[in-house]
Image (cartoon, helix red, strand yellow):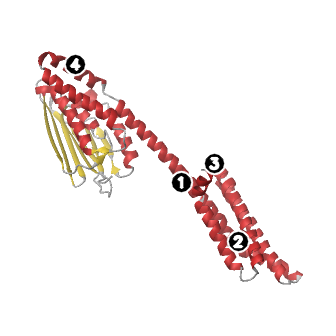
Amino acid sequence: MFKKNYLNKHLFLISFWFVLGFAVWIQIKGEFDSLQALLHTSLIMASSIIVSQWLSDRVLPRAIKAQQMKPLVLKAVLFVVILAILIGSINFYFILTKEGIANHERTELILTHFYQAIPSSLLINGTACGIRFYQEHADIQRIHGQLQQNFLESQVKFLQDQVNPHFMFNVLNHIHILMKKNVEMADYLLLKFSDILRYQLYECNQPLVLLTRELQYLQDFIAIEKMRWGNELDVSCSWNQSSKDLYIAPLMLICFVENAFKHVNRLPNQKGSIELSCVEEEGKLQFNISNSYQDYPQLASTGHSGIGLENVKKRLELQYENNYSLTIHKLDNSFMVLNASPQKFSLLFFAFNIFDIFFNQPGSKMLRILWCKMDYFTTF
């Protein structure tokens, strides 16, 4: 197992040394007999591997860890010179054994071979360090990806385990009241509530879920809220899905539906309203939700987007990387804009536009409009 992992990790480096050794052997085999050519090649390759691997495996990681780049450059130059001296000396020795060279010509010939070996030494050491950089980068990317995946799983698990206590208390209390007045309605409400819990606890364990189930989850949540609010709230929903095999990250849209019911106005003389439109066509989902809102100064001054929205932002960054655009603008206590410029991506497109409009007249409403559009993966 260890040998297999080692080969997989160093396959590119092993291939490089094999190709380099073959190229050196091809270059010198015409000048020497087979045994001398093999010995010549072996000495050059052994020197190259020892020097370059010492530089890339020992010197380079320590210098990067200590952030000592200037000493690294000096050491790299030294290793290039050392390898050039070794290669030049090996070449000179084999030429010396083949041909008789006068003593006064040897110094000049040694320098010539040294100068000729510098480009080769630079190429060999540079390639070894480049491969080492690639391996380190791949390891960092792998670890970073694993950490991202673990964090994402913990975030999804948090959403799964997080059942709004206030929402649960209100639903159970409403069921308790209905049991005395309308048993059938209480039974219907209890079934919807159990469907919500079942989806959160058992069906959201995968990175992606069917869009059909996610929308059904939203519909169950809205059905419960409509029963709780009764005649105090007008809720208008439109659902249109053309494809049944599309997938979405679980619990991605519920935050916006929860916020709509949470922030809808509750004035006794003013009926609240929520409008929702969800249209999927040709693998593209357009999700619109708006709610009437009463401008309370203490709420407007907080400037807090909520844990749920922040959670969604983190999940978007992890699951959809740079395939979405999201910007937030706060212009004073009376106006806030959250928007994203529409961009088309081959696999995914995710954008939000929220316009919060405040009016100065007492008792007026603020309309909060959420526009969300997403392209999903169509095959799995």
Sequence-wise first label, 2 or 4: 2
Q: Amino acid at mark 2?
A: Ile
Q: Is residue 233 above or below residue 357?
A: above
- Which residue: 18% across, 32% down? 223
Q: Is residue 244 above or below residue 266?
A: below
Q: Is residue 231 visible?
A: yes
Mark 1 highlights which residue? 138
Secondary structure found at label 2: helix
Give the distance between the C-alpha atoms of the residues marked 1 and 4, in whole angstroms.
Answer: 54 Å
Circle 1 packing at 10 Å, graded few (<14), some (14-19), many (20+), is few
Quarter-of-image position of residue 121: bottom right
Q: Judge from the rendering whether residue 348 lies leftward or rightward of residue 154; answer left or right.
A: left
Secondary structure found at label 1: helix
Sequence-wise first label, 1 or 4: 1
Q: Which mark is residue 173?
A: 4
Sequence-wise first label, 1 or 2: 2
- Which residue: 19% across, 29% down? 225
Secondary structure found at label 4: helix
Q: Position of residue 45 (x, y in %)?
A: 71, 68
Mark 3 highlights which residue? 65
